[in-house]
Image (tube, rainbow, N blue to C red):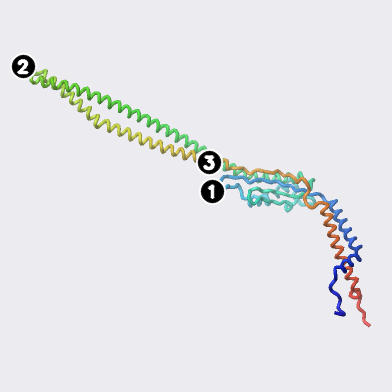
């Protein structure tokens, strides 16, 4: 509409404005680029210093999962609240002054799926020795504290292994005694078999003698009626009776005593054999426990430094070229903005002039 200022500016008009104020834009670009170049030249290069360590293990749980000497959260808290401040005081003084390292300059990070903790900081090469001492001191402090836990775990496992080994030796000795007892009882059983054979032979001899004597005794009784002496008949009859009594005694030993003694020996052998088998099971169980303890001892791993404090090869942060380019772009934007502002001021001089009445 007529009488209203034009609010839309075409792209061609904008370029015309920029051409009109190209000196302003050029001056802004030059000043910004020169400032960026100067800062890039005097800026001290910063290097990244980092030290890392792996938290140790004190064993595994029933599911086979590792048990760490300390959680990553607790270890990070110990570094930030204890070891790092102490190391800063020890190696870089206790009062923050220009150029000194500060607690907030250090960053503690850890891998998501691993128990690895790293301590990093950015510092110039001139501070390299101090940074190295600080980071290594912190890592050594954590490792030293965890070494107490891993050492205690190793000592406990070693004591258990000694106890199990002693138990195995005792059980092996007891089993050896049981096996010797079985061998002794088996020998007694063989002797019993020999004794039974001897008694059987004696029975056969007595039976043969009785078989020979009985006709004589019978004949003696007949001969007595034919004037044979009674004394001879009595002696022969007594001898037969004695031999029959001996034969009966041997038969009782064979039928009663020997089977009973055999049964006792066999029962004793079975009892001792069962005892030896039970001891063997205990030995197997103890050896399995000893093997498990050995595996547990192998699973105990001390906290160790996997990367000592060292710096990056190249400086970190933006390079000089990037800084100059950023300065150039910033100056260009500032120049364009300043050109548009100056054009707006020149376009409405009446708005900026003092008002008059008349």
Disc 2 is placed on an element classified as loop
Residue 200, position as x, y percentages in the image = 25, 26
Residue 132, position as x, y percentages in the image = 74, 44
Vertical position of residue 123 compared to residue 164: above or below: below
Residue 114, position as x, y percentages in the image = 63, 49
The 10 Å Cα crowd at callout 1, few under 14, some 14 to 19, many 20 or more, is: few
Q: CA–CA distance between discs 1 and 3? A: 15 Å
The 10 Å Cα crowd at callout 2, few under 14, some 14 to 19, many 20 or more, is: few
Residue that badge 1 annotates: 63
The answer to which of marks 2 and 3 sits earlier in the sequence is 2
The answer to which of marks 2 and 1 sits earlier in the sequence is 1
Q: Quadrant of residue 347?
A: bottom right
- 181 with respect to 239 (left or right): right
- 6 with respect to 277 (left or right): right
Residue that badge 3 annotates: 293
Residue that badge 2 annotates: 227
């Amino acid at each position: 509409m007529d009488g209203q200022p034009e609010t839309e500016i075409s792209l061609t008009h904008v370029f015309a404005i920029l051409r009109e104020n190209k000196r302003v834009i050029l001056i802004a670009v030059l000043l910004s680029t020169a400032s960026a170049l100067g800062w890039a030249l005097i800026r001290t290069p910063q290097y990244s210093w980092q030290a890392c360590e792996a938290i140790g293990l004190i064993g595994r749980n029933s599911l086979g999962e590792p048990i760490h000497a300390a959680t990553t959260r607790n270890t990070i808290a110990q570094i930030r609240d204890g070891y790092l401040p102490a190391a800063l005081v020890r190696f870089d003084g206790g009062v923050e002054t220009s150029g000194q390292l500060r607690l907030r300059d250090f960053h503690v990070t850890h891998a998501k799926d691993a128990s690895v903790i790293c301590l990093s900081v950015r510092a110039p090469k001139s501070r390299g020795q101090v940074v190295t001492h600080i980071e290594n001191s912190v890592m050594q402090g954590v490792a030293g504290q965890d070494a107490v836990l891993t050492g205690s775990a190793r000592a406990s496992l070693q004591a258990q292994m000694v106890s199990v080994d002693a138990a195995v030796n005792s059980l092996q000795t007891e089993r050896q005694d049981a096996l010797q007892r079985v061998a002794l009882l088996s020998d007694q059983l063989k002797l019993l078999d020999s004794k039974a054979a001897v008694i059987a032979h004696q029975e056969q001899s007595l039976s043969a003698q009785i078989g020979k004597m009985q006709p004589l005794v019978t004949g003696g009784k007949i001969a007595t009626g034919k004037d044979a002496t009674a004394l001879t008949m009595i002696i022969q009859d007594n001898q037969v009776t004695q031999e029959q009594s001996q034969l009966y005694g041997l038969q009782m030993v064979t039928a009663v005593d020997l089977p009973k003694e055999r049964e006792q020996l066999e029962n004793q052998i079975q009892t001792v054999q069962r005892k030896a088998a039970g001891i063997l099971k205990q030995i197997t169980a103890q050896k399995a426990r000893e093997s498990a303890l050995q595996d547990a001892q192998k699973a105990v791993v001390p906290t160790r430094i996997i990367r000592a404090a060292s710096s990056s090869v190249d400086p970190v942060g933006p390079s000089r070229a990037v800084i100059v380019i950023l300065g150039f772009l910033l100056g260009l934007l500032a120049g364009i903005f300043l050109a548009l502002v100056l054009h707006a001021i020149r376009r409405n001089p009446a708005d900026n002039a003092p008002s008059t009445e008349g």
